[in-house]
């Protein structure tokens, strides 16, 4: 830095696209980059391109509130998210990059008897999968977080479900670490290149993609375009069970350390943590209309702040520094899809709703496994595209009490 960054080597190459690749991944977000990294590292497939219409990490991977956890309940989700948690725990050593993984604990507050029972059930389900969970009573929560509203709350805090291994990770660094690791192994990361069409032969097989840098051929095509999944799916004639909605987030001015874990409000969708720079990072619910715009409306801003202040009265004295939005690929049951499609050599990774950041490592690993072996990884075996037709929805998280 003392050289004014003049002598810094770029983290990855800026290659021109080759005419043909074994695998093309559309989308240079967390999931696309992680998939490329694991394809190269775990499965030895390096003739790969990641094609990104903007810059690496400019999508949701750089817009999220950085929460990681594995406190899911259902069979289709819990082992998958726990695999992700274990990968997070070794990620920085694995890709040799500081992603500031911080296992500061996550507490999901509950405010009624029914909600306590639901959280106890969730905790029990976690423990049946070998994942530790603790049910806190009101006094235990008060000791950990005395600044919460215990006295005049419309929805009094009755306790919380704690996963100590949950926490946060620096989102951009995750994209950069995976990107650099993939590039080092020979993957071409092609930025500022939008995929505008998917070319198929007479038998319906994908032969490559039309892009703003021309046609690029491939043997296998993998879509990891998050909020634009319905758009890229349509290019291959697929009508997918995905709706895109905006999710907003906020960061306050930097203040002294006050919140040393992640908290979710059970009587609303509000959640909050404090970044290492001191800013309070918080968010709430999606904006309830479909949109590809990466910004939301003021009604949601007001709603978020009201929820925050009702949970933490002192928040009313803090100034918001920035607010932004990202576009979420909402699936109909709240769970993701990592699967092949009716087109033999087209693979799909989507449906992350507002919780896909924490899934990044396992998603990349399982998607790479699927692409390399043509069969699902065991922990992702229920995350199938046709589950809605078959009546095997993995109904969790989409509208439940826990965002992110
Ligand atoms: P993205 O980073 O969006 O990657 C998709 C990429 O595809 C984009 O870069 C886009 O430009 C590219 N693309 C799209 N179309 C094309 C095309 N035609 N050609 C080429 N490239 C294309 N999750 C958590 O687990 N914890 C959280 O705390 C959390 N908080 C969130 C808060 C907010 C405000 C938001 C917006 C999201 C949050 N999420 C959270 C969700 C999480 O960020 C997403 O689920 C996840 O990042 C999606 O996967 P991705 O990283 O691959 O997406």
Image (cartoon, rainbow, N blue to C red):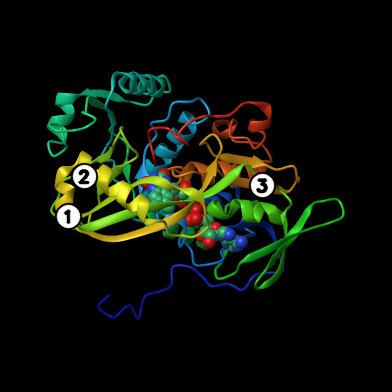
**Could one spot residue 145 in this view of the protein?**
yes
Q: CA distance from mark 3 to mark 1?
A: 45 Å
Q: CA distance from mark 3 to mark 2?
A: 43 Å
Mark 2 in CB contact with mark 1 (< 8 angstroms)? no
In terms of depth relative to the viewer, which is nearer, 139 or 193?
Answer: 139
Instruction: Give the x, y percent position of residue 354.
Output: 44, 45
Q: CA distance from mark 2 to mark 1?
A: 10 Å
| Local crowd size for mark 2, using a 10 Å CA cut-off: few (<14), some (14–19), many (≥20) | some
Left/right of residue 199 with respect to residue 131 in the rendered view: right
- Residue at mark 2: 309
Q: Quadrant of the N terminus?
A: bottom left
Asked whether disc 3 touches disc 1, contact meaning CB atoms under 8 Å apart, the reply is no
State the SS at label 3.
strand
Name the spot of residue 126 as percent of width and height, x first. 39, 24
Q: Which residue is mark 1?
A: 318
Q: In this rendering, would 341 be left or right of 328?
A: right
Who comes first in sequence, dot 2 or dot 1?
Answer: 2
| Residue holding disc 3 | 347
Label 3 or label 2, whichever lies nearer to me, is 2
C-beta proximity under 8 Å, tags 3 and 2: no
* Residue 55 position (above or below residue 356): below
At x 15%, y 55%, the residue is 255
């Amino acid at each position: 830095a003392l050289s004014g960054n003049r002598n810094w080597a770029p983290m990855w190459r800026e290659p021109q696209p080759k005419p043909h690749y074994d695998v093309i991944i559309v989308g240079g977000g967390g999931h696309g980059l992680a998939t490329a990294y694991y394809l190269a590292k775990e499965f030895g497939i390096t003739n790969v391109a990641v094609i990104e219409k903007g810059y690496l990490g400019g999508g949701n991977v750089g817009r999220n509130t950085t929460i990681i956890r594995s406190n899911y309940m259902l069979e289709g989700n819990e082992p998958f998210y726990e695999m992700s948690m274990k990968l997070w725990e070794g990620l920085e050593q694995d890709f040799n990059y500081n992603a500031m993984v911080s296992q500061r604990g996550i507490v999901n507050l509950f405010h009624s008897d029914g909600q306590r029972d639901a959280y106890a059930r969730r905790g029990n389900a976690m423990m049946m999968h070998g994942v530790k969970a603790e049910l806190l009573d009101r006094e235990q929560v008060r000791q950990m977080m005395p600044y919460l509203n215990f006295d005049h709350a419309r929805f009094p805090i009755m306790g919380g479900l704690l996963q100590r291994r949950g926490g946060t990770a620096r989102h951009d660094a995750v994209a950069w670490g995976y990107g650099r690791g993939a590039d080092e192994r020979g993957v071409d990361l092609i930025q500022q290149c939008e995929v505008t069409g998917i070319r198929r032969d007479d038998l319906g097989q994908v032969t490559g993609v039309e892009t703003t840098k021309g046609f690029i051929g491939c043997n296998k095509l993998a879509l990891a375009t998050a909020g634009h999944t319905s758009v890229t799916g349509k290019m291959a004639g697929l009508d997918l069970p995905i709706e895109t909605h905006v999710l907003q987030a906020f960061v306050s001015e930097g203040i002294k350390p006050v919140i040393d874990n992640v908290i979710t409000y059970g009587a609303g969708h509000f959640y909050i943590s404090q970044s290492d720079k001191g800013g309070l990072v918080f968010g709430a619910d999606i904006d309830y209309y479909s949109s590809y715009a990466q910004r939301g409306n003021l009604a949601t801003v007001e709603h978020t702040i009201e929820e925050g202040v009702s949970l933490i009265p002192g928040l009313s004295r803090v100034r918001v520094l920035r607010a932004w939005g990202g576009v979420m690929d909402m699936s109909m049951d709240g769970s993701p899809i990592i699967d092949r499609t009716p087109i033999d050599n087209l693979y799909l990774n989507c449906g992350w709703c507002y919780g896909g950041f924490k899934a990044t490592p396992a998603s990349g690993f399982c998607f790479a496994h699927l692409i390399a072996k043509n069969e699902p990884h065991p922990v992702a075996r229920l995350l199938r595209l046709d589950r809605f037709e078959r009546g095997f929805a993995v109904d969790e998280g989409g509208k439940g009490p826990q965002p992110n």
